[in-house]
Image: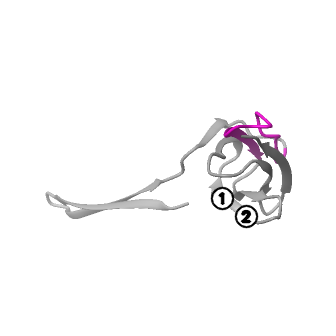
Amino acid sequence: MGYIYITGKSAGTGTGDDYATIKYSQTVGIHQISNQIPAQYSLQQNYPNPFNPLTKLRFGISNLVFVSLKVYDAQGSEVATLVNEQFRPGTYEVNFNGSNFTSGVYFYRLVTDQFIETKKMILTK
């Protein structure tokens, strides 16, 4: 995921120049459902399944960790990266829009340094 950095300067009285940089995340479609720390990592079945064209993917993270959530077609080719960044502990939900994909079976895979799980979902149009 990309970030937007905004940097500015202001002239203080008696203190010289002050500088500040703000980093904004461009994360879209990822919602923290709960900041309660799950006992373990988890990847839930998407809902609804089958879907057309929208579905929700929910996962739980038990500690601060880098998370990757990707979608693959039936041949195993990566077709979408939904998450690729560090997350705080909590439960998250990601919206997936399959309107640009053909009907069929897809797989979504959650990967951290301590957990890997893959689930199947079906897109019907």
Picture quarter with the C terminus = top right
Label 1: state its secondary structure: strand
Q: Can residue 42 be seen in this view?
A: no
User: What's the magenta region?
Assistant: 40-61
Quarter residue 50 falls in: top right
Residue 101 appears at what percent x and percent y? 67, 52
Residue 115 appears at what percent x and percent y? 84, 57
**Neighbour class for label 2 at 10 Å: few (<14), some, many (≥20)?**
some
Alpha carbons under labels 2 and 1: distance apart = 8 Å
Q: Is residue 53 magenta?
A: yes
Residue 38 appears at what percent x and percent y? 79, 40
Location of mark 1 (residue): 81
**Neighbour class for label 1 at 10 Å: few (<14), some, many (≥20)?**
some
Residue at screen point 63% across, 39% down: 32
Q: Does the magenta stretch include residue 77?
A: no
Q: What amino acid type should be assigned to the residue bearing mark 2?
A: Glu
Quarter residue 112 falls in: bottom right
